[in-house]
Amino acid sequence: MGCKIYVGKKGFLVYRLQWSNQRSWEGTNLRDTAANRKRVEADADLISREMKAGRFDYARWFPAGNKIPKADAPQQGWTVREYYQKWIQQQRPPLVRKSSERDYRQHFSRHILPRFGETSLADSTLTTRALMDFQSYLLHDAPRLKKGELGLAVKTVRNIIDGSFRAMVRDAREIDQLLTGDPFAAVQWPDRETIRRDAFTREERDKILEYFRSEEPFYYPFVFTMFWTGMRPSECTALRVGDIDLANGTISITKSRHLGEERAPKTSASRRTVKLLPHVIKVLRGAKELRVTEDDYFFKNRFRTPIDADQWRRDYWYTALRAKGIRERDFYCTRHTFISLALTAGENIKAIAEQCGTSAQMIEQHYGRYMSSDFGSRMMAEIEAETEIKTEISEGDFAKAENDEENWRPRRDLNPCYRRERPVSWAELDDGDDCW
């Protein structure tokens, strides 16, 4: 695996490529001179390193290479590799998220193309059985990044097959009509494991905030806001000064930031207005810079650039947890903490869902253990208070009725028993009165 430089028969430099069970010779228009060889060798070294890291993109390096299908080539009979090299060029921002492009390239270069690269995109060859065999291989025999370990996690395998591979085949079917059926529909998968929302306790939250207040005060407002608003890290790092209205105590969530790319929130519910508690307003007011515009980022790193949540987590978050003797959990768990403590405090589920940009159903499904299981306790307290008032009135009326016979005047209704001048006795009913 790697890239080497040779001199062709006509004196031009040539790349010799070998990666993922593939080989290719790619010519250049450069003569074999010292300057040209230095330039080509530098590119060859970079290509070799990308191959070893599993990030080599043939189409990016050689858009007119020998393995790139020609524009006039018939679509029928294309292989998976040929169609992928065309398809992946369209899977770039802003059409897709940067993280999706990264996953597509990694999944195809490391797993899909070595197995299906030369397979024809046709119903007769790309079958459900072939996909299930591939599934079994990935689950049990595929090498992991750690040497000596085999088999990938179910979630990873599903992302490869049911995510990246299926997305490309869907486009081949619906856009280019290369096949008619969906071989992925019948592939069976284990039930999805419920992801545990691993929230911090109130005491752990306070210890973490105390650490940042005393040891890393520069990032204290950032962490404080995460714990007390329920925002996602990608939402908080994307906040601009103009998104925060301290006068009205609100934050407008209109975008998210991940891998240095900003996009609209993932779902319509994520686009929302977050209400700020008074102590959050106080912290943010003290953290707001004086010489900023509405387009400046509110939270920045020490280099005055936007915070990269993944890098910040590695540099600061886990250090704080270890310093306070708290079990390591992801920075995203600040959101879980806000939701769990709000439920424990008895806040309305719908209000929590609107605050956090999710659904009440999701909160009930994943955070139900934080809700009170003492059903009826609050209702009974209200009923008892109401009954006590009614009882006092009823007893007073009854005492008054005993001393005033006029209070026994009959009510006018259909029951003949109530037409009497006094209550009916059991003896009278036994004498044959059929008013019941």
Image: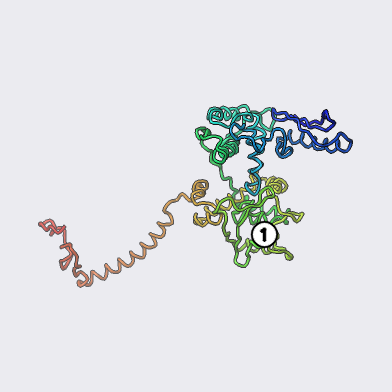
Q: Position of residue 77 (x, y in %)?
A: 59, 31
Identify which residue, 216 or 331, lies in the foreground. Answer: 331
- In this rendering, position of residue 210 left or right of residue 49: left
- The relative height of residue 218 versus residue 412 in the rendered view (above or below) is above
Residue 226 on image: x %, y %: 63, 54
Q: Position of residue 76 (x, y in %)?
A: 58, 33
In which quadrant of the rendered view does residue 342 lie?
Answer: bottom right
- Residue in view at x 63 percent, y 65 percent: 246
Label 1: element kind? loop
Outermost residue to the left: 432
Image height of 127 relative to 101, above or below:
above
Q: Nearer the viewer, residue 343 or 349?
A: 349
| Left or right of residue 377, residue 202 in this image | right
Residue 175 drawn at (x, y percent): 56, 41
Tell me the quarter of the picture where residue 78 sits. top right
Bin the neighbour count of mark 1 within 10 Å (Cα to Cα): few under 14, some 14-19, many 20 and up: many
Q: Name the residue that disc number 1 marks.
A: 240
Residue 34, compared with residue 291, is above or below; it is: above
Compare residues 342 and 262 and report the one nearer the observer: 262
Could you tell me the amino acid type at mark 1?
Arg
Question: Can residue 189 be seen from the camera position used here?
Answer: no
Which quadrant of the rendered structure holds the C terminus? bottom left
User: What residue do we see at 60% from left, 62% from top?
Assistant: 250
Quarter residue 214 falls in: bottom right
